[in-house]
Amino acid sequence: MAPAGAFRHLTLALGAAVAALGSLLFIAWKIYFRGTGTGASWAGWWERELRELREQQSRDPPDGTLDWRQVLILGLDGAGKSSVLHYICSETAKERIAPTQGFNSAQLYTERLEMDLLEVGGSQNLRAYWPHYLSQAHVLVFVVDSVDRSRLLTARQELHALLAEEPRLPLVVLANKQDKSNALSVAELHDELALHTLSGQREFFLLPTSATWASLSTATSVLRVKSLLVTLLSQP
């Protein structure tokens, strides 16, 4: 009889594969149905924000279409990716945001732009699937826990492995949890993540962030990330 530990590892692996397959199918579904008027009613915390953003649009392009862009949000588990996604898309207070077990997705609209924001879980079982999402991405957002010193080496290795797959993909690194007293500074994280080795051909940004309700009015607000993404993706 196989030991209990073997069954546990098999279960985790199968769960990761199912989650990854589901998110890949979701991407394919989005690409196939984009522009056809077909879609699902995505219940969730971003619905009110999306409705408000649509109402704020002053005018559409002459042909009535929006340029589509995808933002891929990655990072180790516990880095705060789900919180970043929440506060980019919705300026509403939330006491607790559950960790991502598979993937989360949201949409933002500007006058001429439709942005799909796809967050993939950062557990060890899911990281092997990260490279599969790069080909459709227009910007990679990599979230780092500025307090978790013990896993900075892992974060650096995972980040550079992704960058090797897509040498020209624009990169936004978020030094998250800057509201914590023991958080590493942006300069320290720049060194720890070996960001000085990045090619000059890649657009690259390193921002301090605090993905909390209280921080939305501070210099580390994730709303700065939202503005940066709109600027980057609006470029011809």
Image (tube, grey):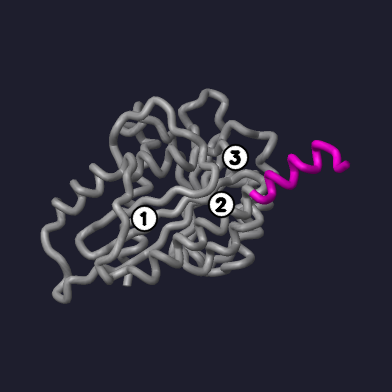
Query: Residue 188, labelled with which disc?
Result: 3
**How far is mark 2 from mark 3, CA to CA?**
34 Å
Other residues around mark 1 within 10 Å, as few (<14) / some (14–19) / many (≥20): some
Secondary structure of residue under mark 3: helix
Q: What residue type is labelled 2?
A: Ala
Mark 3 or mark 1, which has the lower sequence index?
3
Secondary structure of residue under mark 2: helix
Q: Nearer the viewer, residue 136 or 38?
A: 38
Query: Which residue corresponds to the image point at 66% horizontal and 56% vertical from the top-left?
Result: 128
Q: Provide the residue span drawn in magenta.
A: 1-14
120 versus 150 height, above or below: below
Foreground mark, 2 or 1?
Answer: 2
In the displayed orientation, state which residue is furthest to the bottom.
63
Q: Mark 1 points at which residue?
A: 229
Which quarter shows the N terminus? top right
Q: What residue type is labelled 3?
A: Glu
**How far is mark 3 from mark 1, CA to CA?**
24 Å
Image position, residue 57 (x, y; %): 15, 56
Judged left or right of residue 148, residue 39 is: left
